[in-house]
Image (cartoon, rainbow, N blue to C red):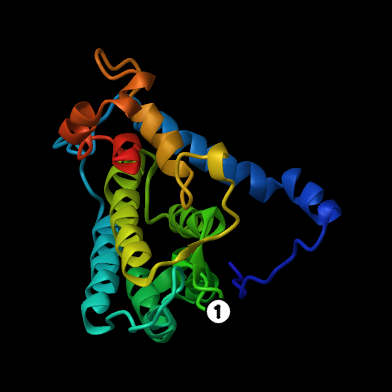
Amino acid sequence: PNFEVPKKAIFNTADLNNFKISKTYSEILVFVRRCNEAVLGRRLQDDSIEMPIAGQQVIVMLETFEGWIASIPPSQQPMRFGNAAFRTWHARLSREAPGLVTSLLPDGVADAAIELVPYLEESFGNPIRIDFGTGHETSFVAFLYCLARLGLFRPNDLPAIVLGVFNRYMKLMRALQATYLLEPAGSHGVWGLDDYHCLPFLWGSAQLTNHPSITPSAVNDDNLIQEFEDDYMYLKCVA
C-alpha cells in the first residue's frame, strides 16, 4: 500500500458534508461502535482480557510520555490556563514520535509511520494554544483505528483496546491536563459532563449496561463513585 502524510482537507461545511458520506467516515464510526459493543458490561479490571503485543507496546509508549512530565515541570507563571512548559513536553513528543511509532510496526508496514505519526502528535493537545479537546481525543482513536487496519489489532482485541490502551491514554491526559493546565478546546459547558473528553462517556456507559445497582443517578452518589471509579470509565470521569 501507498502511505502519505495526512493533511487538512475539511475547510468548510461542504467539505464536512462530503466527509460524512465518505467510506473513511463510515469505517471510523463502525470502529467506534464495535469498540462500544466490545465492552458492554465489562469492568476496567477484567482479568479475562488478553492484551495483544501491539497494545502492550502502545501502553509502554504512553507510560514513557507520562514519565517525561517529571523532567519537564510546569513553569512558574500567573495563569489560569495554559502552562508554557507543555510546549517543551510536546516538542519532545514531536522529536521522538517517529522512532517510537516505527518501532511499533512490522517491517512490511513500516512505511505507514508517516501517516500514523501526525495522528499521534495531535492526540495530546495543541502546543500553540496549550489546549485539549475532543478533536485531539479523536486523533488518538484514529491512531488506534490505523493500527487495527494495519492488522496489529484483531477484532477480538477490541476490549483490550478500550479498557487497556484507551484507559491508559485517559490516565496520561488527566496528568497532562492537571500539570500544564490545558485549556478546554471548544468547551460546551453544560452540554457535556467533561470539558475535555467524549468517548469515556460513550464507552463508559456501555460498561454500565444492565448493571444491577449502578444507575444514571449514581453520578450524584459520591460514595458509590469512590467505590467503583477504578472499574468504570464513566464514573472515573465524574469522580
**Residue 135 location, x and y as percent?**
56, 57
Q: In which quarter of the image is the C terminus?
A: top left
Residue at the outermost right position: 14
Disc tally is 1
Residue at x-position 29% and y-position 63%: 175
Q: Quadrant of the N terminus?
A: bottom right
Instruction: Say above or below: 221 vs 107.
Output: above
**Residue 65 location, x and y as percent?**
29, 72
Residue at x-position 62% and y-position 74%: 4
Instruction: Say above or below: 195 vs 211.
Output: below
Kind of element beneath mark 1 = loop
Amino acid type at mark 1: Ile
Residue at x-position 37% and y-position 45%: 154
Label 1 sits on residue: 128
**Residue 185 location, x and y as percent?**
56, 60
Image quarter of residue 110: bottom left
Q: 10 Å neighbourhood of mark 1: few (<14), some, or many (≥20)?
A: few
Q: Is residue 168 or residue 144 the one in the foreground?
A: 168
**Residue 104 location, x and y as percent?**
34, 69
